[in-house]
Structure formats: structure tokens, C-alpha cells
Amino acid sequence: MNKHFFPKLAADNIRKNKAAYFPYLLTCILTVSMYYIIKSLSLNPGLAAMRGFDILSYLLSLGSVIIAIFALIFLFYTNSFLMKRRKKEFAIFNILGMEKRHLAKTLACETLYIAAASFAGGLVLGIALDKAMYLLIAKIIRTEISLGFFVSGEAVRTTVLLFSGIFLLIYLYSALTIRISDPVSLLREGNAGEKEPKTKWLSAVCGLACVGGGYYISLTVTNPLSSISMFFIAVLLVISGTYLLFTAGSVALLKMLKKNKRYYYKTNHFVSVSGMIYRMKQNAAGLANICILSTMVLVTLSFTSSLMIGLEDVVRMRYPNDFGINLREMDETTYQELSGLVRGIIREQNLNVTAEQEYSYLSFLSLEEDETFSIPRSISSKLSFLLFYGSLRRFPQ
């Protein structure tokens, strides 16, 4: 055959099946752009000028890992719909004399076209929106915005390598599906409905354990140093557990309801349970994706809204006064002189001080023993008294 035959055939197939390929291509472009944005933000040098940039960069890095895992599952799921609609087409090609290796070459060219369009569209969209996301973060944190347009070469390279691997796995799975199927089965599967799924108790139990473990970690972790890494583990457990519960746990629950004759043999229950069992194999992954995406949106909105709404309360709680002055280890004479100097500055600047507190405190070391505190003799002789003059003043709003 002509060496240009398979690329032309692949292009014609995509063009003729544009109604099925367009949603898949749009999904790939949006997934590529979403991963690039998160990865590029984690590498953006402008974050170094923001408060807490190290934590923010670390969180974005963990987010890019989660999106990579989600992209692998989501693209496999969307490709399965595409392959199901095209099985009849592949069967006709095979019956007309095209060998399976020829179908594999055609499928490889189609995958290359989809990958190239996804990289081009996704990276262009990601680079365009990356600056907007950076400006949004800077606006939320209320930090200075640096000029310039940042394009991360490492983020581009990582994105291309990651999704090249994903498209390669999708192609291998699709080619293997065609290779192990005969033309007659492919022709029938194109119009065949979903078979009733089998009960997978092990997967259902694992899904329940993963979800329970994820929520247990999120509720019991108390160490702030390990909370971020433990939260990442909890997210992975909840995502994997959600997929297992929807794909296996829902089927197991419906089969249990079906075995309950008193519940199952009723008009409404019989129809609904039978229909859900029949359709769950096809829709479980989609429902899991919707659940995970909805949870991500709700958590993000509630978290950011709580931070924005409660920011002023946090500032007032941690810094209830406009300014304070600390004087350490001062004698009484020096203390009186500095106190008078401060009050003189207040009068010169015409500051309207509505509240003022002044106190001293003592700082020392102690040991906890059986719910009591004791001061060792080696420490008691080295105690130092610290005078603290706190001019805690609040200006009228």
C-alpha cells in the first residue's frame, strides 16, 4: 500500500466521525491545558515574592499529580465511548479485506492526530490562561504583581511526556481490543448493549476501605507539619475508593437488593433495580468522574470562600491592636524615659489612641512532671526578668 494511505484514511475517519471525535478532542485539550496551568504555576518564579510561596508551590505540585492521575482515568473513560461507537466501522474494514495490523496502523495515525491537536490546543490555551490564574492568585493573596509573561519549559516538557504516555496507553489498549476480537464480534458489539456486570466483592470492600481510610486520615491528622502530605494521601484514597465504589460497590449493593425478595419483587423496585444493574457497568465511571469533579469544585469554593470571608477575623484575632512596643530587660529609669518618648511621639503625630494597656511579664523554663510543672535548680539561678511595655492601641474605624 501507499505509505500515505493510512494517514489519509485516518484523517478521513476523524472527519467523518467528527460528531464523536469533537467531544473527545475537546476533553483532551481541556485536560492538557488544566495540567499545564497547575504545573506551570508550581514552577512560576513570581511565587517567590508571595507570602508562603513554599507551601503554595508544594500544594500546586501535589495538585499536578492528582490531575495527572485523574487525566489518565478520564481520558481512558472517554476513549471507551469512542471505541464502542466505532467497533462496527472497524468490523466492516476487516470484512472488506483490511488486516488487523492495517487497522492498528490507521488507529495509530488517528491517535497521533488527536495527540498533536491536543498538545497544540491545550498548550496554547494553558499558556494563555496561566497568566490569568497567576494574577488571580496574586489578587487573592494581595501581593505585588510582577510584570512579564512566564512560559515554563519544564512544564511544557512534563505535559508532553505525561500525555504522550497516556495516549500511548490508550492506543495500545484500543489496538489490543481490535486484535483479540473477530470481525463478527466487533460487528455485533457495535449494536450490542451492556451485559449485566458481575459482582466484585473484593473491589467493593477495597473501595469502602479506601474511602473510609481517606476520611479517617483527614479527620484525625493533627500534626500541621505532616498534614499536607497526609491530605495528599487521603485525596488519592478517596479518589480510588470512589471509582471502586461506583464500579463495584454499586453493583454489589444492587445485587444484594435483588436477592432480597421482599424488596425486589415490587413493581417500582423491580424495574428500577433491574435497570440500574444493567446500566451501571457503562455509567459507573462517568458517575464517579462527576462525583469527584463536583467534590473538587465544592471543596475549592468552600475553602477559598472561607479564607476570603474570614481573613479579616483572623487578622483581628492575631493582631487586635494597631501597634505595640516591646522593651526587654530594661531598668526602671530607662523604661520611664522610653515611655515618655513614646507618649511624646503620640502627641506630636496627633494619634487618637482609644485603648492602651501596659504590663510586664516573666519568662522562664520549666519541666512537666505528672501534670505539674517544676523549675530545676540549675535553671532557677539564671532567670531573667523581662519588662514588656505594650502600647496596644486601637484607632477608631
Image: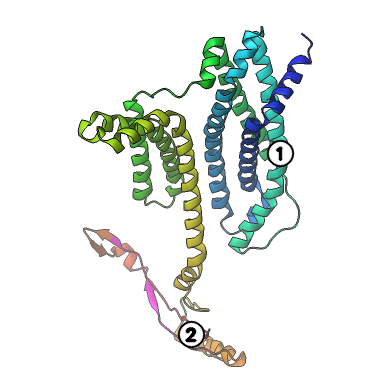
| Residue 175 found in image quarter | top right
Residue at left 34%, top 36%?
272
**Secondary structure beneath label 2:** helix
* Label at residue 121: 1
What's the magenta region? 353-367
Residue 57 is left or right of residue 335, and the answer is right
Q: Residue 172's x, y, as percent?
A: 59, 19
The three-letter code of the residue at mark 2 reads Tyr
Question: Residue 346 in the image: x percent, y percent?
Answer: 57, 89
> Which colour assignment does the render follow?
rainbow
Check the image and name the residue furthest to the front: 267
Q: Residue at x 67, y 11 (%)?
A: 102
Amino acid type, residue under disc 1 in the picture: Gly
Residue 268 seen in this snapshot: yes
Based on the displayed image, in which of its 4 quarters is residue 111 positioned? top right
Left of 260 or right of it: where is 55?
right
Q: Which residue is mark 2?
A: 335
Instruction: Report the side of 248 relative to 61 (left or right).
Output: left
Q: Nearer the viewer, residue 143 or 211?
A: 211
Is residue 8 located in the magenta-colored stretch of the structure?
Answer: no
In this view, 46 is above or below 175: below
Q: Position of residue 376 (x, y in %)?
A: 29, 63
Task: Examine the structure image and report whether residue 359 is included in the region drawn in magenta.
Answer: yes
